[in-house]
Image (cartoon, rainbow, N blue to C red):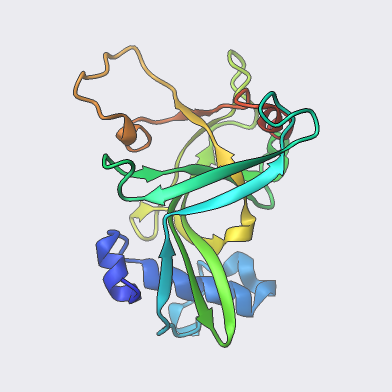
Amino acid sequence: SKKVEVLAVQIKQPRLLELLRRFLYTQMIPENAQNALNVPLAECPRFFEKVNVYTSACATYHAPSDPSGCGGMHKQYIWATPRWWSGGYRFDCVFVDVENSPAGINGLGIARVRLFLSFTYAQKTYQCALIHWFGFLGQQPYNMTGMWVVQPEDDAVNHGPRLEVIPISYIERGAHLMAKFSSSRIPASHQYYKTLSTFSPFYINNYIDHHAFERIR
C-alpha cells in the first residue's frame, strides 16, 4: 500500500509512521539528529504523504576480485522482499555509515533492511530504508576467527527491535553474516531464509571478498 498506516500493518511494523516522522526530524533539524529517537513525537513533522515501496536497491563500489578485475567496480543488489523466488522472505544485512562505531569497524554499523521506500515531502524526494540495528559484542574481533560478532538489538523503551529509518545513501554495501552455531543439532525442518531470525549471535564475514576484508578490520 502507498498509505503508511496500511503499509505498517502489511509489513507488521506498527511504528513505521512514528519512525518516518522522526526521520523527517533529522532532515529538518540535522543538528539535533542524534536525539531524534528521544524527542517527543509531537515535535516531529506530521506525515500524510503516500510512499513508494521497492524490493531492492543496488550498491556499486570498488572491489578488486576475479569477477571484477584488479581495478574493477562491483555491483551488488540488496533485497528487502517478502517473497524470494516464490519461496520465503529475504531481508538482507548491510553496512551502514555511522559515527561513534568501535574503532576497528572504520565507522561502519551493521543492520538488516526491512523496507526500501521513497516519498516526497515539502517538494523534496527522500529515498530511505527501514532498518533493524545489530549491536557489536566486544570491542575487538573474536580471537579464534578474526571476525567481529554482532546480535540484533532491542529497543528497551518500545519493547521490540531497535528500528530506524535512514537515508539510503547511508548504506555502503551488503554484509554477509554467519550464525555462531552452538553444539545443538539444527532441526531438519529448519528453513534457510529464517536463519537471521532464528539464530544469534552472528559473525561478520570479512573474508567474503577483498572489499570487505579491507573495510572491516
> Residue at point 47% right, 52% down?
56
Numbered-mark total: 0
**Left-right relation of 171 to 39:** right
- Asked if residue 198 can be seen in this view, the reply is no
Q: Is 128 drawn above or below residue 178 in the view shown?
A: below
> Residue at point 36% right, 60% down?
158
**Left-right relation of 138 to 161:** right
> Residue at point 63% right, 19% down?
146
Extreme residue in the left direction:
189
User: The N terminus lies in which quarter of the figure?
Assistant: bottom left
> Residue at point 60% right, 25% down?
208
Q: Can you give x and y, in whole percent of width and height, for residue 186 in the image?
A: 27, 18
Q: Is 207 drawn above or below residue 137 in the view shown?
A: above
- Asked if residue 76 can be seen in this view, the reply is yes
Q: Quadrant of residue 195?
A: top left
Q: Can you give x and y, in whole percent of width and height, for residue 108 in the image?
A: 65, 44
Q: Can you give x and y, in whole percent of width and height, for residue 15 in the image?
A: 35, 66
Q: Can you give x and y, in whole percent of width and height, for residue 89 in the image?
A: 31, 44
Extreme residue in the right direction:
71
Q: Is 204 drawn above or below residue 131 in the view shown?
A: above
Q: In which quarter of the image is residue 19?
A: bottom left
Q: Is 133 drawn above or below residue 70 in the view shown?
A: below
User: The C terminus lies in which quarter of the figure?
Assistant: top right
Front-most of 174 and 71?
A: 71
